[in-house]
Image: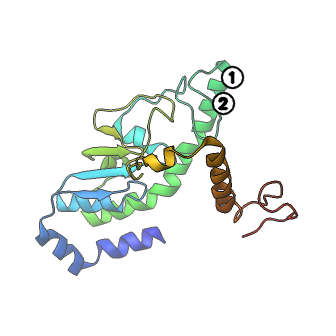
Amino acid sequence: MFLSTCEHLLYNKELIRYLEESKFDAVFTDPILPCGQILAEHLSVPSVFYLQQIPCGLEFEATQCPNPPSYVPRVFTDNTDHMNFLQRVKNVIFDIPNFFLCDVVFQPYSKLASEFLQREVTVPDLLHKASIWLIKLDFVLHYPRPLMPNMILVSGVNCPMACLVISDFLSIPPSSLKKILDVLSCNKLRKYWSMKDVCRPHSTRRTK
């Protein structure tokens, strides 16, 4: 479906003509679907990527960023950045399917890009040309790993700014405050879980 959408976008002559005439400064896109980068290459404009990660680790290959299995834990391994020998072996084993996954998922996009740009090109070649990678990670919540100079961590950029607690709220006695928080928590959670010991003493089923 995504490939078909990308193909219809790229071969929409009226839309492509509009984009060419508009003289945009850059393309802001998610590289998981490389259609945006194909378009940026056609328009000869810089591209800015916004992502958390590409499932098969293609961002490391595209940026030539070190990704050592000795201390960068792989997804679904439950490893930390401090691993013994067997955990490192497990890390390497989890890397093997990535090579096949990338070929299966991105090969159709490589073919489409080669046809549209009229030259032989691969998806890693396209992603390598990105100017900035905005990555939704933060070392406060994730294990440290190597980064390239054009990789910027922006975790939390979509979170709203916290509001200041009003002085009236702070003046509430602690005993009353605890009761208020219990009621608020109960009201929020009862839609999703059975709260038989808190909200609904006689409820034994999940409520929606």
Q: Is residue 147 visible?
A: yes
What's the residue at 52%, 29% (across, down)? 72
Q: Is residue 144 left or right of residue 97?
A: left
Position of residue 57 measured from the top left corner of the image (x, y, whole percent): 48, 42
Position of residue 99 measured from the top left corner of the image (x, y, whole percent): 53, 43
Farthest residue, direction bottom: 14
**Does residue 15 sit above or below 108 in this rendering?**
below
Q: Which residue is mark 1?
A: 86
The amino acid at mark 2 is: Lys
Question: Answer yes or no: do the residues labelled 2 and 1 have beta carbons within 8 Å?
Answer: yes
Q: Which colour assignment does the render follow?
A: rainbow
Position of residue 166 measured from the top left corner of the image (x, y, whole percent): 43, 49
The amino acid at mark 1 is: Leu
Position of the C terminus by quadrant = bottom right
**Does residue 126 sit above or below 12 in this rendering?**
above
Report how far apart the C-alphas of labels 2 and 1 lie in the structure.
Answer: 6 Å
Q: Quadrant of residue 15?
A: bottom left
Q: Which residue is mark 2?
A: 90
- Give whichever of 188, 63 is nearer the camera: 188
Identify the secondary structure beneath mark 1. Answer: helix
